[in-house]
Image (cartoon, rainbow, N blue to C red):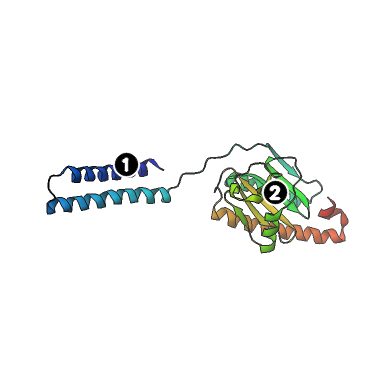
Amino acid sequence: MPGSARLCLISGLLVLGLAIFNAVTAGTFTPALQRAEVLSGMAAVGLMLVAVLWTRAVPRNPKAVNLEGEQGLEITAGLPESLRTELAWGSHQFLTATSAATILVNWDETVLLRRGLITKDPFSPGEICRRSTERQALVSLVRTALYPGRQEFDAVLPGLPAVMVQPLGQRGWIVLGGWSERCFTRSDERWLAGWAERLRTQLELISVDGDSHPQTDLKGI
């Protein structure tokens, strides 16, 4: 609770306590005293309500988690230069402009990119990734501790407190892991969806070219 909200709460409790003490110790209850007690009670409740609303309006920011991993950048060898540039640019933007700690791009069962805090563990999409593909919509786990299937992201980075999964059509995903619970905003979600559309278009074009030129086929990388 912020300091100002705590002060309002303490003041409300103090006013309420004094009003009760005054009512108990008063010899007689005159009409004037009754009105004063009602007004003081309303003031006390009002102060406590302000404290509650203040806390909701300015919630405490979750603390960042100490995540274990090595800072790094891994881009699969053999990708076209334009795609490498897009992956490097997009991942850099997410890691510097949002609360993301790590990012992974998977396409056609191949991890094209790992950046930020990374591990060497092979990534295997699970139920949450498949659900995002079925819905063709972003899945945001604002607090992974509440989700039984969170273990599928341990290969991205163990102990991630928040995860966003954005499908790349039917063939892949972007996985974004955050430093703390509820760290991603609606703006981050829209940005991720927009970049995913742009990246998917490039990947599909390269895959089409790969059908004619096998050396650029991403499945063979």
- Residue 162: x and y in percent read 60, 47
Q: Residue at x 60, y 55 (%)?
A: 191
Amino acid marked by disc 1: Ile
Q: Nearer the viewer, residue 219 or 17?
A: 17
- Mark 1 lies on residue: 10
Q: Residue at x 17, y 52 (%)?
A: 34
Residue 24 in which image quadrant? top left
- Residue 29: x and y in percent read 14, 50
Residue at the far bottom in the pictured view: 135
- Residue 53: x and y in percent read 38, 51
User: Residue 152 bears which disc, if any?
Assistant: 2
Query: Against 137, is 22 above or below?
Result: above
Residue 168 in which image quadrant? bottom right
Please tell me how crowded label 2 is: few (under 14), some (14-19), or many (20+) other residues with Cα within 10 Å. Answer: some
Residue 72 in which image quadrant? top right
User: Residue 160 bears which disc, if any?
Assistant: none
What is the CA distance from the residue labelled 1 to the residue labelled 2? 45 Å
Circle 2 SS class: helix
Q: Earlier in the sequence, mark 1 or mark 2?
A: 1
Image quadrant containing the N terminus: top left
Amino acid marked by disc 2: Glu
| Residue 48 in the figure: left or right of residue 103 | left
Query: Against 197, is 221 above or below?
Result: above
| Residue 44 in the figure: left or right of residue 118 | left
- Residue 12: x and y in percent read 29, 45
Circle 1 SS class: helix
| Circles 1, 2 touching at the beta carbon (< 8 Å) | no
Q: Residue at x 53, y 40 (%)?
A: 63
Please tell me how crowded label 1 is: few (under 14), some (14-19), or many (20+) other residues with Cα within 10 Å. Answer: some
